[in-house]
Amino acid sequence: MTKKNKSAIQRRLIPTYIFLIIVSFFSVFPLYWMISAATNTSTDVSRGRIIPGSYFMENFKNLTSQQPLWRALGNSFFYAILTTVICLLICSIAGYGFEVYHDKGKDRLFSILLLAMMVPQVATMVPLFKMFSKAKLLNTSIGFILPIISTPFMIMMFRQNARAFPVDIIEAARIDGLSEVRIFFQMFIPTMKSTYAAAAVITFMNAWNAYLWPKVIMTDNKAITMPMLIANLITGYVTDYGMLMCGVLFCSIPTMVVFFVLQKQFAEGITGAVK
Amino acid sequence: MKKKVLTVLLTGAMVASMAAGATVVSAEDNDNTLTVWAWDQNFNIKSMQIAADQYAADHEGFSVDIIETSSDDCQTKLTTAANAGDYSTLPDIVLMQDNSYQKFLKAYPDAFTDLKDMNINWDDFGALKQSYSMVDDTHYGVPFDNGAVIACYRTDILEEAGYTLDDLTDITWSKFEEIGKDIHEKTGKYLLTSEATGGDTLMMMIQSCGANFVNEDGEAYIVGNETAEKCIDLYTELVQNDVVKLVNNWDEYIATITSGEAAGIVNGNWITATLMSTEDQKGLWGITTMPKVDGVDTATNYANNGGSSWYITSNCKNVELAEDFLASTFGSSTDFYDAILPETGAISCYLPAGESEVYNEPNEFFGGQPIFSTIVEYSSHIPEFTKTPYHYEARECVNTAVVNIVNGTAKEDALQEAQDTLAFKMTE
């Protein structure tokens, strides 16, 4: 490639870059605004100040004095990690089973499962509540996580990705005398790391952000999670925007960290790569 | 590595089974503890806590367990519990917005306990306030905060345009428009700020006439309702003549005030707490009565917007204790109301409370006006009106009609649409 050609290509890319810069500005600005608002007084935020201020510690102090921030963070971590671990285990076994084993009714069962994806969560709330109340699971951690530890979407995702897992490996392992359980734990899981990473990010975020169901069945202040805490901050008669944004910041950091740590695997897992 | 993954999974399973045992159980079933739902740390939660502390002084061992539950969440939880037929998740006492309570009592009458046997003098509360929590002469709720409407104005901006607070006291909306236009010309500021679809201005206008957008049978009544049309005409004119700044949501509504773009706000008196959080406007505000609707015989300068009451649910294990607690604090104690006022700014609906010294103290933020006793006084003049469980639906329909008229739709069409939409919503 000549030098002239190269610069022509670069010139052609200029509009693309300009477009990308504008789009990324729009997606990054809310994050910037969240951080800058967390450092300003409520009045300044309301007046539209976007430069970071020096009020962060005050906002933080107000937040911790009014709301059980550490408890909410702890609860959120507990429920989100627990849900993620169990959900990954159950859904990957289900997805793996659907793909690897053969049975007549398998595809029909899978269609029913996918059909369940179409039912909105709100529509199932009252029947779920009834079931949980009969089973005496209201106001329990089990009641909190049970409805979200196995989702049709996750099973489908694991099944899709299990397709890329070479059948030869399974057969070779069987010949070598590995039990089915050990094939799954020792061959499948390590190979599908990127799928697990993607699933972990999605499940963690969903569990972290869960609001409606936990709020309906948990009736104890001790069970407060971060989304509930944020909701408490905006339902008062006077909204302290600085304090609110400080809370939102604390609520967003964990999901951001999880995403950034698993970002590479996430992209691979979504596109279904096996290494 | 393989082992590591296995370990993680097994640990996960272990934690899960442990969690199964260690369930979160609500506060121990203590006969002397009442659970309460309320939604504002600095306001109703604090008031409830103070009430509990006062009651506990005479009743050893008494305490409340307050669970912060927003008004919306309270409604979701109540609806779910009622539909599932299991009220066991409900607390003993719940705080509900006056405007939404009727709907719930109508839909789930068995969720609440009536207060027929309560030892309380109901006449110590304004008639309108009582009516929010009553059905057919039976009381269900103990009134809490006052929702009397006040008009707050920036006296410095008024002065700049050559007006005083007196010029805006006990006036009509057309006089208000005249002054508003003049102020906008002279200062570039709006005399009033209002939300476009979620705003209460129109509701306050019609209720100040003792009327509503529904008739006595509870049907939508907008087309052919003279009072309704008068209110809508006046309000539309205010918007078209730059007297009212119409904004999209609550945050913008507050921003027009903090930025000084609007010189006035008409709303329930709880708005004072928001105004007072803008400390650099201290001393610049004044309160007075809201304007009244022109040409309507029943029109007054008083209305109600917001406010809430305490209800005892059917899940309450110790109704006697709950009734006695509410009656001896919220229901009859001026000492209690005197104690919560400086701490929370919660203004009483209990009329005798307005006469106390605490209520008559001048307020520096409002230029030394004794705003609390003034507000309690306003609340005794508010006319009763036909209530509807579809308050919020009606509000949305008429506000949409105004936005449509401002955008060029013919008035008849816009009103007909509002009427039809509201009638439809009532069938849902």
Image (spheres, coloured by chain):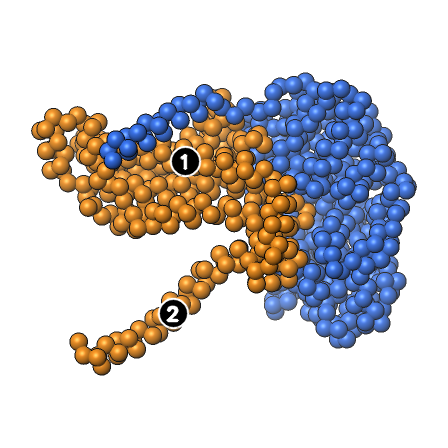
Chain colours: A orange, B blue
Chain under numbered label 2: A
The answer to whether residue A123 is above or below residue A23 is above
Q: Is A142 left, or right, of B141 in this rendering?
A: left
Q: Residues within 10 Å of mark 2 (few under 14, many from 20)?
A: few
Who is closer to the viewer here, A119 or B42? B42
Q: Residues within 10 Å of mark 1 (few under 14, many from 20)?
A: some
Q: What is the C-alpha distance between the residues marked 2 and 1?
A: 38 Å
**In which quadrant of the rendered image does the N terminus of chain B lie?**
top left
For mark 2, give the secondary structure.
Answer: helix
Point out residue A125 in the picture as x, y percentages from the top left corner: 48, 34
Q: Which kind of residue does numbered mark 1 sit on? A: Ile
Q: Is residue B345 visible?
A: yes
**In which quadrant of the rendered image does the C terminus of chain B lie?**
top right
Which residue position holds label 2? A19
Q: Is residue A130 visible?
A: no
Point out residue A46 in the picture as x, y percentages from the top left corner: 63, 59
Q: Is A34 left, or right, of B164 in this rendering?
A: left
Residue plotted at (69% across, 60% down): B258
Who is closer to the viewer here, B138 or A134? A134
Which residue position holds label 1? A81
Residue plotted at (42% across, 68% down): A22
Point out residue A219 in the picture as x, y percentages from the top left corner: 57, 30
Q: Which kind of residue does numbered mark 2 sit on? A: Phe
Residue plotted at (31% across, 73% down): A13
Point out residue B169 in the picture as x, y percentages from the top left corner: 86, 60
For mark 1, give the secondary structure.
Answer: helix
